[in-house]
Image (tube, helix red, strand yellow):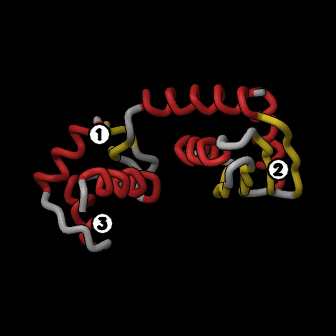
């Protein structure tokens, strides 16, 4: 497996799990069929510039550096501002129409931001379907989109 692929899996593990030790990474990756050593994880942590932040369950957990989120948010706002066409809301769903080519970028940036309101996104070339956790969360998130536009 290529380093970039492994590091993409590590990014997803950070979203899905509360990882407190390098050995946690090793175990989770091995469970997915990615055989790594603690030394490899140590190099990945350094290269990816992972940081330890307070965990909601006590102790500390690994996380992406905060700066990456700031850059992703800035890029999200810029991309939505430049490509937004329309928005429709139905229950917990938000349908964004954007200029061709922007859908996948916006969907990816929304996923990177880990907004509490969002359950997931689906996109094509010029559309992004934002699936929110609830109808109330969809209304809250649509306000965020309005502020970006």
C-alpha span from label 1 to label 2: 35 Å
Residue 117 appears left or right of 58:
right
- Residue at disc 2, secondary structure: helix
Q: Nearer the viewer, mark 1 or mark 3?
A: 1
Q: Earlier in the sequence, mark 3 or mark 2?
A: 3
Disc 2 crowd, CA 10 A, few/some/many (<14, 14-19, 20+): few
**Marks 1, 2: nearer the viewer:** 1
Q: Position of residue 82 (x, y in %)?
A: 71, 27
Q: Earlier in the sequence, mark 1 or mark 3?
A: 3
The spot of residue 81 in percent (x, y) is 72, 27
Instruction: Please name which of the two marks, 3 or 2, marks the residue nearer to the observer.
Output: 3
83 or 10: which is nearer to us? 83
Label 1: element kind: helix
Q: Quadrant of the N terminus?
A: bottom left
The residue beneath circle 2 is 136
In this rendering, the answer to whether 75 lies above or below 86 is above
Quadrant location of the C terminus in the rendered image: top right
Which label sits on residue 48? 1
From what the image shows, is residue 135 above or below residue 86?
below
Q: What residue sits 68% from the left and 54% below the top?
A: 124
Query: Which of the two discs, 1 and 2, labels the residue nearer the N terminus?
Result: 1
Residue highlighted by disc 3: 28
Rendering coords of residue 48 (x, y %): 29, 39
Residue 2 position, x and y percent, is 25, 57
Label 3 to label 2, Cα distance in Å?
Answer: 34 Å
Among the 4 quarters of the image, the one containing residue 64: top left
Quick one: 74 or 67, which is closer to the camera? 74
Q: Residues within 10 Å of mark 1 (few under 14, many from 20)?
A: some
């Amino acid at each position: 497996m290529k380093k970039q692929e492994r590091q993409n899996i590590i990014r997803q593990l950070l979203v899905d799990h509360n990882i407190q030790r390098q050995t946690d990474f090793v175990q989770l990756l091995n469970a997915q069929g990615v055989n790594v050593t603690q030394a490899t994880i140590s190099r990945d942590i350094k290269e990816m510039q992972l940081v330890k932040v307070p965990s909601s369950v006590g102790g500390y957990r690994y996380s992406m550096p905060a700066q990456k989120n700031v850059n992703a948010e800035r890029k999200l706002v810029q991309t939505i501002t430049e490509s937004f066409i329309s928005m429709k809301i139905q229950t917990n769903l938000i349908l964004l129409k954007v200029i061709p080519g922007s859908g996948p970028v916006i969907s990816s940036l929304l996923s990177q931001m880990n907004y509490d309101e969002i359950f997931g996104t689906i996109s094509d070339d010029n559309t992004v379907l934002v699936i929110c956790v609830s109808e109330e969360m969809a209304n809250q998130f649509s306000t965020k989109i309005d502020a970006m536009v």
